[in-house]
Image (cartoon, rainbow, N blue to C red):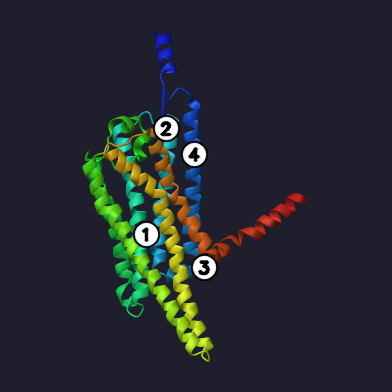
Amino acid sequence: MNSSSSANQSSSPLFCLLGYSHSLDTCMLEVAVILFLAVLIIAGNLVVISVFHCAPLLHHHTTGHFIQTMAYADLLVGLCCLVPSLSLLHYLRGLNEELACKAFGYVVSVLKSVSMASLACISVDRYIAITRPLSYGTLVTPCRLRACIVLVWAYSALIFLPSFFGWGKPGYHGDVFQWCADSWKTNPTFSTFIVALLYAPAALTVCFTYGSIFRICRQHTREISQRHARFSSQTESGEGERCEGCTDKRYAMVLFRITSVFYVLWMPYILYFLLESSGLYRHMAASFLTTWLAISNSFCNCLIYSLSNSVFRKGLGNLLSPLLPSCLSYIYTVRT
């Protein structure tokens, strides 16, 4: 009896995110990919958080607070990525699969919603800064900024709460558990609800604000060029105005790159989510690839910001400078 049962277990396919497989290599490949992403996400966002705490100049822009909010949310996403690895390695067998996958899917969906809503808030903040520069200080106060961040977290937590109680499926993050992949189905009504209250408003807000920002920056640049051409004797004042306009546009470009990469990485996931919810297409490999492509954005945010922001690079250099001499002296001591 024991030999026959063990033979049946050995011949039965293993459950992996890419589907059922008779080879353990498939699961191990998935574990390697997920662990690699987890390490990148955790390390990258820890660097961003550390630099923000050590570089006071980054706090001069209110968008820095939203960038920090995204960094904390992405750091938690990286820590959550450890759960799929433990599940695929069969270290979580004692857990209630239904409760565990619902909780995991809910938490990751909330964290990514925080990132999406923060990007929309950043675009609105830059829009106010460029369209109403004189009244910006009275419109965007520290109290309102903190209230907005709290509202982002509360809204993200509430919008996905119905899925935890059985109305629809928020995404495929919980499919690391077999119950989620086999028994938890997407619901067209809930998917429409999420698109209408989260995805569509955030995307439309970003498109409108950045479209207006670049149109205004282009108009200002054209006006400054015309003014500089008319009054060539006032060269210094014209160049000062031009540099000021370039600074606003350059900073807006940094945030636009972060937003663009976010939607490029998340669009395949959203499209597949809508296709499966409507019953048009379903494939486990597609759900795995689109899900972890979207989650990889949690590392891209900090990478783009660190490469594009000169103040951030300076803060990173100040953070690492005390470590470099000690490392060099250690290497020199070892060699000698």
Task: Say which amino acid is labelled 3.
Answer: Val
Q: Residue furthest right?
A: 336
Q: CA distance from mark 2 to mark 3?
A: 42 Å
The quarter in which the N terminus is drawn is top left
Q: Residue at x 36, y 50 (%)?
A: 112
Task: Say which amino acid is labelled 4.
Answer: Val
Q: Please state if 170 lies on the left or on the right of 38 as rendered.
A: left
Q: CA distance from mark 3 to mark 4?
A: 32 Å
- For label 1, the residue is 119
Q: Secondary structure at mark 1?
A: helix
- For label 2, the residue is 18
Which is nearer the eye, 36 or 219? 219
Asked which quadrant contains residue 116, the reply is: bottom left
Q: Relative to residue 296, is residue 102 depicted above or below?
A: above
Q: Position of residue 57 (x, y in %)?
A: 48, 70
Q: CA distance from mark 1 to mark 4?
A: 27 Å
Q: Residue at x 32, y 42 (%)?
A: 273
Q: Secondary structure at mark 2?
A: loop
* Residue mark closest to the camera, 2 vs 3: 2
Q: CA distance from mark 4 to mark 2?
A: 12 Å
- For label 3, the residue is 311
Q: CA distance from mark 1 to mark 3?
A: 20 Å
Q: Secondary structure at mark 4?
A: helix
Q: Earlier in the sequence, mark 3 or mark 4?
A: 4
Asked which quadrant contains residue 215, the reply is: bottom left
Q: Residue at x 36, y 64 (%)?
A: 123
Res 33 label: 4
Q: Position of residue 26 (x, y in %)?
A: 48, 29
Task: Say which amino acid is labelled 1.
Answer: Leu
